[in-house]
Image (spheres, rainbow, N blue to C red):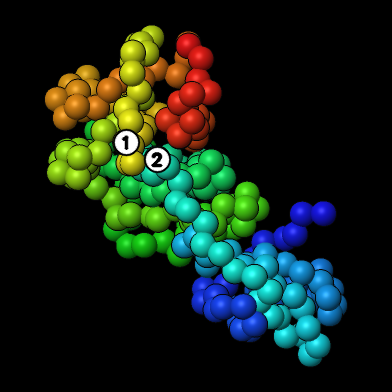
């Protein structure tokens, strides 16, 4: 039977205790009614994974601990945020698919104006999705950026990438490297001027099919294609 995953911000070595926040502790002891001998998996969202056992007096002790390798490639999603319910779905699905970071981008046809401050609710959604998917690397939510600024940042860091294109085109070779960017526009798509700007910064147009996808669908579809290019068939 697959063990349930929980979050612990500070995981020590074998034999150390697991300290949980009130929500995780309630889930284990009130909802699941854990008893001594029960085992669970804990992650800090930064690659550390520990198997731990419930002892007497509701103490939880680490039985084994490891650091899982980061995904390769690291996929950076730059997306024009849809409305809140659809953005929440996007976050869940992309965390399950193993995206490395998420950057809200400000585009001409934007539907939502991204907030400058970090959103603890969104970070919680990402973490919950990672626990469900057994993904030990929780995506990082970056501050919003204008599209031109984001493209400049990608160029400075040497990160290649693709952008969602309307025309039915498939690149001969998908971008490769340790880091890859996937740019997804708003509901109305990128403007022609924005597409020219992305091409000028070396981004490759990538069409996902002959149907019109929602932003959240296109986001996760592109993440999977670019993370696992060998499994793609045109």
Classed neighbour count for the residue bearing mark 1: other residues with Cα under 10 Å, few (<14), some (14–19), many (≥20): few
Q: Residue 28: horizontal and vertical position, in percent?
A: 75, 72
Rendering quarter of residue 6: bottom right
The residue at 67%/61% (across/down) is: 5
Rendering quarter of residue 153: top left
Q: Is residue 60 left or right of residue 193?
A: right
| Image disc number at residue 112 | none
The residue at 30%/31% (across/down) is: 161
Classed neighbour count for the residue bearing mark 2: other residues with Cα under 10 Å, few (<14), some (14–19), many (≥20): some
Q: Residue 138: horizontal and vertical position, in percent?
A: 49, 56
- Give the tally of numbered discs: 2
Q: Is residue 104 above or below residue 206?
A: below
| Image disc number at residue 73 | 2
The residue at 33%/31% (across/down) is: 176
Q: Is residue 27 visible?
A: no
The kind of secondary structure element at disc 1 is: loop
- Kindly indicate whether the residue at mark 2 contacts the one at mark 1 (C-beta within 8 angstroms): yes
Q: Residue 122: horizontal and vertical position, in percent?
A: 48, 57
Mark nearer the N terminus (1 vs 2):
2
Return the residue at label 1: 177
Residue lying furthest bottom? 57
Camera-nearest residue between 149 and 229: 229
Q: Is residue 230 above or below residue 62?
A: above
Q: Is residue 166 above or below residue 50?
A: above
The kind of secondary structure element at disc 2 is: loop
Q: Is residue 2 left or right of residue 216?
A: right
Camera-nearest residue between 207 and 158: 158
């Amino acid at each position: 039977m697959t063990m349930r995953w929980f979050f612990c911000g500070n995981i020590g070595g074998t034999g150390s205790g697991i300290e949980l926040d009130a929500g995780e502790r309630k889930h284990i002891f009130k909802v699941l009614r854990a008893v001594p001998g029960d085992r669970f998996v804990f992650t800090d969202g930064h690659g550390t994974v520990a198997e731990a056992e419930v002892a007497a007096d509701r103490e939880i002790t680490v039985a084994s601990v490891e650091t899982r390798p980061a995904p390769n490639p690291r996929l950076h999603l730059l997306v024009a945020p849809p409305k809140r319910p659809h953005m929440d779905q996007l976050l869940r699905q992309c965390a399950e698919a193993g995206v490395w970071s998420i950057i809200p981008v400000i585009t001409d046809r934007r539907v939502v104006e991204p907030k400058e401050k970090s959103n603890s609710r969104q970070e919680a959604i990402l973490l919950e999705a990672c626990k469900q998917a057994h993904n030990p690397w929780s995506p990082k939510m970056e501050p919003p950026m204008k599209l031109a600024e984001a493209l400049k940042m990608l160029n400075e860091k040497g990160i290649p990438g693709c952008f969602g294109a309307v025309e039915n085109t498939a690149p001969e070779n998908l971008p490769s490297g340790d880091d890859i960017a996937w740019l997804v526009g708003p509901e109305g798509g990128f403007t022609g001027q924005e597409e020219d700007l992305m091409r000028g910064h070396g981004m490759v147009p990538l069409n996902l099919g002959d149907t019109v996808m929602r932003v959240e669908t296109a986001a996760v579809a592109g993440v999977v294609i670019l993370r696992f290019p060998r499994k793609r068939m045109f």
